[in-house]
């Protein structure tokens, strides 16, 4: 899953609005801006924050960023991440329920995220070692895909957390879990590098399907 960073982004957005209001109040008259326009600007900023919270669950900044001319690059990185999950899941024969690229797609599905790939939930959390290895490959595939294409990963915190929970409930010791996860990461990075064209094609397809404001 591609991380949203909604907490820090929401706080930054609110802080910028407050700073703007403060600046207008302090320097607007000096710059010749009428009091009426200051009131309009302040009201508009507060309305935008309210609409974002009510309609976009505080994720409006992400939705808007993805809709801007430079937003396709942002969405493509998310598509690469999710494409990695999908390709490795197909190799491991783990069913994929749905794939969402972009904040708008996730919000429509009721998720506060920038991207997500949903899998069929395992019947038991205490899985055999080979099943844990398969999940280690699939859940780390988004991080590996970003690393292959961009040199480093930005998303994947939720993936790592879920993988840690699966290993934590498995009964295996920490050393085994860490060793198997490192091994899985090496395997999938190698596989995705060798299949780079397939990764790019799948990412392109996901990017084409991703919803954006205005289209």
Image (tube, helix red, strand yellow):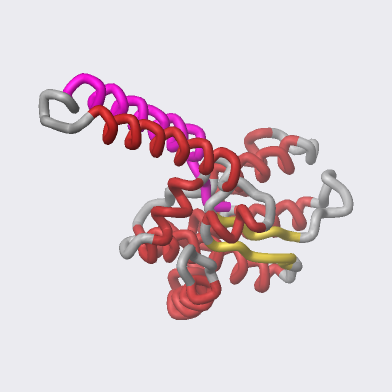
Please state if 37 lies on the left or on the right of 44 as rendered.
Answer: left
- Determine the residue positioned at 44% across, 46% down: 61
Q: In this view, which residue lies farthest toward the right?
A: 123
Q: In this view, which residue lies farthest toward the left?
A: 31
- Determine the residue positioned at 53% across, 58% down: 142
Please state if 40 lies on the left or on the right of 33 as rendered.
Answer: right
In the rendering, at what x and y percent does residue 7 appear? 50, 33
209 up-or-down from 58: above or below: below
Among the 4 quarters of the image, the one containing residue 85? bottom right
- Which of 187/48 is in front? 48
205 up-or-down from 64: above or below: below
- Determine the residue positioned at 65% across, 49% down: 111
Please state if 112 lies on the left or on the right of 125 as rendered.
Answer: left
Residue 144 lies in the magenta stretch: no
- Determine the residue positioned at 56% across, 56% down: 115
92 up-or-down from 158: above or below: below
In the rendering, at what x and y percent does residue 191 appear? 51, 69
In the rendering, at what x and y percent does residue 170 appear? 79, 40
Majority secondary structure of the magenta segment?
Answer: helix
The mark total stands at 0
- Which of 137/215 is in front? 215
Residue 156 visible from this viewpoint? yes
Tell me the magenta residue range. Answer: 1-27
Residue 10 lies in the magenta stretch: yes
């Amino acid at each position: 899953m591609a991380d949203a960073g909604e907490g820090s982004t929401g706080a930054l957005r609110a802080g910028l609005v407050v700073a703007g209001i403060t600046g207008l109040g302090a320097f607007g008259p000096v710059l010749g801006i009428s009091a009426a326009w200051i009131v309009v600007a302040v009201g508009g900023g507060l309305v935008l924050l309210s609409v974002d919270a009510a309609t976009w669950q505080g994720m409006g900044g992400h939705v808007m960023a993805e809709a801007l001319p430079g937003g396709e690059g942002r969405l493509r990185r998310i598509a690469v991440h999710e494409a990695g999950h999908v390709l490795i899941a197909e190799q491991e024969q783990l069913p994929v329920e749905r794939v969402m690229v972009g904040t708008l797609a996730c919000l429509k599905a009721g998720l506060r995220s920038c991207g997500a790939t949903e899998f069929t939930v395992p019947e038991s959390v205490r899985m055999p070692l080979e099943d844990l290895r398969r999940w280690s490959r699939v859940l780390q595939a988004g991080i590996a895909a970003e690393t292959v294409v961009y040199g480093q990963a930005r998303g994947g915190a939720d993936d790592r957390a879920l993988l840690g929970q699966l290993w934590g409930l498995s009964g295996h010791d920490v050393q085994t879990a860490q060793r198997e996860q490192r091994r899985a990461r090496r395997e999938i990075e190698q596989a995705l590098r060798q299949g780079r064209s397939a990764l790019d094609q799948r990412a392109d397809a996901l990017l084409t399907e991703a919803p954006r404001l205005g289209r």
